[in-house]
Amino acid sequence: MVKRILFVVSATGESIHGVKFVAELAISTDAQIIALNVVDTSVAKHLKTATGADEAETVVKLEEDGWHYLYDVEDSCKSLGARIVLQQEEGFPDGAVAAAAKRFKADLVVVPRSRAGGYSQSRSERFIMSLIERCQCPVLVV
């Protein structure tokens, strides 16, 4: 029985495509959605090295972007009648998602798959495979 669904919300916008699916799933199973965005702090470190960007300012910008997407997902889910809570964390995405799934006792993790090709797609596929290996509950890719 699915009572808690951990929905991975990325600041790249892929999650917007899976919102309707996860909301309908939550409604049909009377589950609560836990929308999670993970701020990948390694991105800020890479940008500092590559461009000289201020690391702290970059993290703040990534957090703001993450909340923007979380609020969009929340609005969509609520308009469809789904119950949802928002969560944002910092860290490496696959480890943070797996830890959150365990901490929130998620029955299912839903991950939107990147529609982009090339490097973005292979990165997304590595992330998904890592989640499948790390999570103690089923992982559904949409």
Image (spheres, rainbow, N blue to C red):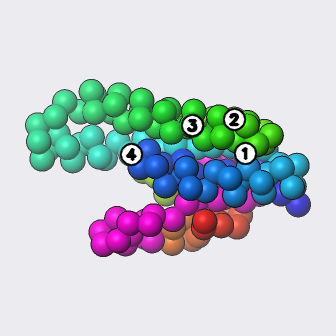
Residue furthest front as drawn: 79
User: According to the image, label 4 marks what residue?
Assistant: 40
Where is residue 62? Give x, y as percent: 37, 36
Which of the marked residues, 3 or 2, is nearer the chain's N terminus? Answer: 3
The Cα atoms of the two marked residues, 3 and 4, are separated by 20 Å
User: According to the image, label 2 marks what residue?
Assistant: 85
Using residue 50 as the reference point, say whether residue 13 is left or right of it: right
Q: Assign a secondary structure to mark 2.
A: strand
Which of the marked residues, 1 or 3, is nearer the chain's N terminus? Answer: 1
- Identify the amino acid type marked 2: Val
Q: Assign a secondary structure to mark 1.
A: strand
Marking on residue 11? none
Whether the residues at callouts 1 and 4 have beta carbons within 8 Å, the answer is: no
- Examine the rendering and report whether any part of residue 130 can be seen: no
Residue depicted at x 80% and y 40%: 81
Where is residue 70? Give x, y as percent: 56, 37
Marking on residue 72? 3
Where is residue 16? Give x, y as percent: 55, 50
